[in-house]
Structure formats: structure tokens, C-alpha cells
Amino acid sequence: MSSGTNGTALVAGAGVGGLATAIGLRRAGWTVRLLERRTAPEHYGTAFAIHPTAQAALDRLGLGDALRARAVPYRHARIRRPDGRVLAALPLERVERKAGRPELLISRPHLLDALLAELDRLGGADVAYGRPLTDPSTDPRAAAANLVVGADGINSTVRTAHFGSRSGVRAIGTVAWIGIADFETGVYGETWGDGRFFGMTPVEPGRTNWYAAVPEATTAGEVRAAFAGWHDPVPRVLAETDPASWIRYEMRHLHPALPAFTAGGRIALVGDAAHAMTPNLGQGACTALLDAEALTRAVAARGGPAGLPAALRAYDAERRRSAQRVALASRTLHRFVTGRRPALRDALAGLLPG
Ligand SMILES: Cc1cc2nc3c(=O)[nH]c(=O)nc-3n(C[C@H](O)[C@H](O)[C@H](O)COP(=O)(O)OP(=O)(O)OC[C@H]3O[C@@H](n4cnc5c(N)ncnc54)[C@H](O)[C@@H]3O)c2cc1C
């Protein structure tokens, strides 16, 4: 890490995007103040898929070993019909051949702990819990900082204050349920039914990460009923996990896409604040990590505050279209999977290369 202070940054939000941004800025010698609305570090959530490109970003942030110590590879995943017939393979082995490393799965709390530990190891960041940034345009801490980063998630106050209200949060009418089963199913991938789907991935030895989407279900009993009769182990996973531990997740995204991820030469958005997307591609954490790494690399390359306008232009050019393409692809996949013509969908899925 460089010594000395190159500039001062205020980061709103201590999720994946905000913590990774704080780490990158500390490594570049910036003084960082991180404000988090929650009163304590969050240990809620199930699992994150980490694509090889996001693994490379974590390597550049000095977190690759911490990731690999807790993550498990994701392989041999299939797309199935509710009767268990395999329609296609998820292209994980193809991704692994191309990237030279597998897609990884890590528990969300483990990744957040690793980011917090690295920030602590670097020192010099002031992390304040229970301190939301409520009005970024008048807050004196924001006014005093050279750089303000909105990593404050889908309902970002930084976005509302500095990027207007044209782009807003849109519900897409699907509720997802996510959870962890305390056994390994050994059956991974997604099962697509009529307007609903169920997915399972590894997450750590002895446990399975699962997610389900059912448009009409509002209770655990209705979710279980919606998947009764599906192939093993789908009903078993739902029967043997405690609904009190399930997380109900209303699928939402940011629409329309923002025309810029930066404003005024000193404000930047990362992660869900910039491009919240549906979870279908499992790219929410990956894109937040890629944003944080790209932003802080651009800032580091240009030294102190005088270089910020150029750094933010470089960040926007590197990340905006790319992240928005992923968000659009995720939304399109959601429509495809839950569409009204499952027979056509299944026939098309069968054409996917493995
Ligand atoms: C509690 C929680 C659990 C999740 N669980 C999963 C999961 O199991 N699987 C999955 O794939 N995705 C999950 N997600 C979504 C996933 O974490 C994000 O899509 C992705 O990682 C992008 O991260 P982010 O840092 O941009 O946003 P987030 O992870 O949403 O982080 C934003 C942070 O900003 C804080 N914040 C909000 N407003 C303010 C404010 N005004 N001032 C200061 N701080 C503020 C929030 O409390 C939060 O900690 C979860 C998100 C949350 C918040």
C-alpha cells in the first residue's frame, strides 16, 4: 500500500461494493471514511457466485487468497425439467476452460468478513456503523471529501441526490426465496417449470445454497406446494430447511439504465446503486467487485484529487456499458425462464452448447 494521503473519500454503504472500494482506495493511499446505515456488520444472506473476472479483481485488491480459502468450485450443473430430465448443461466447464479457473461460490457472510478483515489489516479507514448518509448534497462530511462514492445499494441516496430520479427502482413482479440446506445435494443447476424455477449450488462443505422463484406464492407452505412433485431433491430441500431461515427477496432492478456512473468530477456510484439487476445471472456481487476495482485502479493511476475528473471518466468508460449489458442479460434471462411458452424455452435450452 502506498504511504501518505493522496486524497479523502467518503464511501456510503459497507456491502460488497463499498468495502471493496474502501480497500482499493486505502491501497492507493487515500484516507477513507465509510458510513453504513446498519448498526453492525451484516451476517445475513446466502451465497455469491464469483466469476473468474471478479476473482481477478479480488486478486488485484489483495483478496484472492482469502476468497479461495472459503470458496468452492461450481461444476457439473445442469438445467432440468421438473421431472428431472436434463435439458442442457450450464456453461460452467466452458467458462473454466476459457478462463483457466472455475467459477466459485462463497457464502455471503464469509466474503463480507474477508473484506472487513482486509480493510482492518490495511488500517486507516474510519468505518462507522449506524451512520446513514441521509442527504449527500448537504452533508458536511460529503462536502469535505474529495471523492464521494455511493455504494449504498438499490435505494441509493447518493444516486437520488446527484443523478436525478429518472432512473428508479422497478419491481418485476417475481418473488425469490433463498436459503441454505444443511446437507449436500450433489445435484446442482436449475430446474425450470411453468413460470417458476428452482436452483441449487454448492456453497461450503456439508451445505447447499438454494433459490426458488414462484410468482404466486406468499408463504412457505405455498412455496413447498409449488414444488411438490418436482424431481428429488427439490421437495426434500424445502421440507428440511426451516422457513424461519428463508429469505424472501422481491426481484427489482434499476430502470431505465443511468446515463453516467459519475457526476461533477467527484461523485461515483458502484454496485447496485449504479445498476441493480435481477439475480438470474448471479452477477450482483461480481459486478460490484469489478466496479470497485476499476474505480479505485483509475483513481490510483492518477494520484491525488487533481486527477479525479479524468479517473472518473476512465471508470465510467470501463464499467458502465459492460455492467448495463449484464443487467439487461439478467433481465432477459428472467423473462426467458419464466416465460409463457415453456415448450419453446426448453427446446431452445436444448440447443445450448455445454
Ligand atoms: C442484507 C442483504 C442480503 C443479501 N443477500 C444476498 C444473497 O444471499 N445472495 C445474493 O446473490 N445477493 C444478496 N444480496 C444482494 C447483493 O449483496 C448485492 O446485489 C451485491 O452484492 C451488490 O452489492 P452492493 O455493495 O452494491 O449493495 P448492497 O449489498 O445492497 O450493500 C449496500 C449497503 O449500503 C447500506 N446503505 C444503504 N443506504 C445507505 C445510506 N443511506 N447510508 C449508508 N449506508 C447505506 C446498506 O445497509 C448495505 O449494507 C443481499 C443484499 C443485502 C443488503
Image (tube, grey):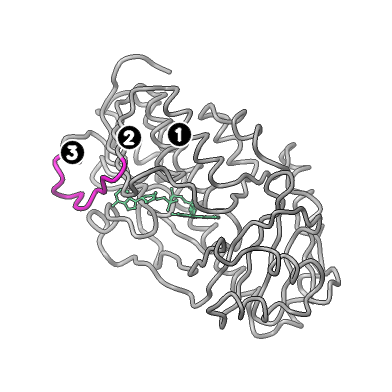
Q: Is residue 132 magenta?
A: yes
Q: Is residue 57 left or right of residue 30?
A: right
Relative to residue 220, is residue 74 depicted above or below? above
Q: Would you say the beta carbon of the disc 2 residue lies within 8 angstroms of ligand 1? A: no
Are the residues at dot 1 and dot 2 in contact (C-beta closer than 8 Å)? yes
**Identity of the residue drawn at 20% across and 41% down:** 142
**Nearest to N terminus: mark 1 or mark 3:** 1
**Identity of the residue drawn at 68% across and 68% down:** 238
* Occupied quadrant, residue 275: bottom left
Please give the residue where the numbered disc 3 appears in the rendered image: 141
Q: Find residue 279 and name its label.
A: none
Magenta region, mostly helix, strand or loop?
Answer: loop
Amino acid at circle 3 = Arg
Mark 1: secondary structure: helix
Amino acid at circle 2 = Val
Please give the residue where the numbered disc 1 appears in the rendered image: 116
Q: Which residue occupies the extreme top position in the image?
A: 3
Quadrant placement of the C terminus: bottom right
Real-space Cα distance between discs 1 and 2?
Answer: 10 Å
